[in-house]
Image (cartoon, helix red, strand yellow):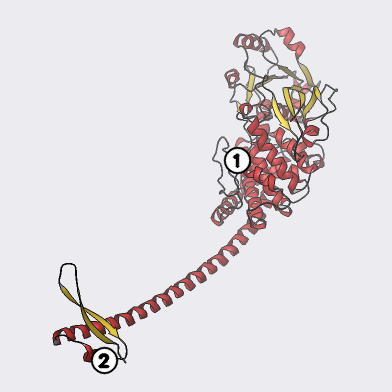
Amino acid sequence: MAPALKLQTFKTQSGNWHPTVYIHANMHARHRIRSSSLSQKLLVVAVESRQKGVVGFAMEMFSSSVIADLVNRSISFLFARCQKQTTATVQEDLRLLRRLLMRSDTIVEEAERRHVSNQDMLQQLKALRDKAYKGYYVLDTIKCQALLPGRGSRDGEDKEEEVKRRTFVLSRFNPAKRVRFPSAGDPKPTVALDGASPGELHQMVCSLQAMIDGMDEFVVLLMSCPPIHREPYSVYLSLDRSMFGRQMEKEMVMDFLLKTQPPGAMNLGVLPIVGPTHIGKSTLVESVCRDEKVRSHFSLITIYSGNDLKDETKATFRDKCVIKHQNNQASSEKRLLIVIELIEDVDEEAWKRLYSCERSMAQGSKMIITSRSENIVRFGTTKPLRLKRLPVEAYWYLFKTSAFGSDDPGDHPKMASIAMEMADAMRGSFVFASMGADLLRANFDARSWSRVLTRLRQYLQKNASLIGEYPDDVKVKDCPRSSWSVIKKKPDKYFMLHDIYQRGSTHREVPPISLSDLLAGRAQPPGKYEILFWKSRIPPYFNYMCTCEICDM
């Protein structure tokens, strides 16, 4: 039964009367309308149109719902299919990356067994090393991301430590950020992440593949290079006990020392080596001086260490030089190698006076001068060698190997994630890497590692005024450093470190208490006394001392 209509009128505020239509069920519209025939027709048409509009609107709503459901299903299907294809592509790229890294390691290890003097080959070898370190870096971040699906608190980590870890954001490391590789030249800080995107991973695989494919000629030339006679390879299995990341620089120094001067050349060859504190200048020179080729080339190798040469004469200078090696073979032709290690700049007049005296040495004699000051570059007769901090990827490779040892970081994803944050916070410091790795190995669990990371960030924030380009740079002697135990949950003491200074390995007396003991909470006797700040494990085996004062919190 069609609904009936009831026509009534109402009066508006202006006094006009207007018809109003009401619909009544079970009554026919034509029998109940009291109006003119024209009004009846208009009302019937309006009602029928309204009924048709309601039905059309319902059909339109039903069609829209069906279409929306079909679109959603199609998108979900396409997304699942793309995700499946992406997963397969990522797995294939990971397999290729592992295989390429094995090939690159083989080439690099073979090159390290040989004396490579060609500069182009050295540049190519350095590029391969850097690319391999980036490959390992991407591989490790993807492992952490795959095994750490959540971003909450790490297992075994205290809620308090989690809050502190998120509070101290001085580090540029953030696991939520994307990988960005540094450009050429001075290494820029690289931001680590939970995992590289599939596109970045594929780009890494393609670039490493192209580089290795172009190494065929390099490998052929490499096999013609003479082998290096050295100690058994087992000695070098521990990276923290060998010079790391300076192979190219070592070959450049050796090339300078062994290069034959043209007949009649009167100038004494001088190579300046510049770099910040604790960057490895002395370690590099010591490694070169221990090489058999260098020792057989020079009859005498001496080293001078001091603040400057201002008050030195020829006699006093030679008296203060320490003999590193003496060779009486006739093939050396009395050639001398003099190494001058300075802290800062050198007086211009003192240098001219010394250099004019040493020009009388046998032809082929060489001199190496090292300093933190860029001003010594003006004394060089060849292009200076500038030591910079390791790229982030290479530094991570060193730190993870030292911290995990024979353990695979992939088996400990939570700890690997913490270690990556620590590596970024330490900003390339060899001293921090050594001490930090010792602490992590001695406390091999995620809870302790998270606490060490938190304390490290607190230390950096507390001593921000002392930290410049390099975190362990000790330029301001009058400003003490404040630190505390990194293992104890709530340290009750802190210690002030004053006047950090270097002492050679010839000094047998070493303080019984080290900074590592204090950081681990193993020994914190009250008072003020000398401690061992850090001991180098590689030649020249420097010891770093400082005065420590224990105070209550």
The amino acid beneath tag 2 is His
Please count the marks in the image: 2
**Cα–Cα span, label 2 and label 1:** 79 Å
The amino acid beneath tag 1 is Val
10 Å crowding of disc 2: few (<14), some (14-19), many (20+):
some
Relative image position of residue 198 (x, y in whole percent): 56, 57
Residue drawn at x 67%, y 57% is 147
**Residue 129 visible in this rendered orientation of the protein:** no
- Residue nearer the viewer, 453 or 246: 453
According to the picture, the residue beneath numbered tag 2 turns out to be 28
Residue drawn at x 69%, y 26% is 481
Residue drawn at x 68%, y 7% is 311
Relative image position of residue 469 (x, y in whole percent): 60, 30
Quick one: SS at disc 2?
A: loop
| Residue 169 image label | 1
> In the image, is 43 to the left or to the right of 473?
left
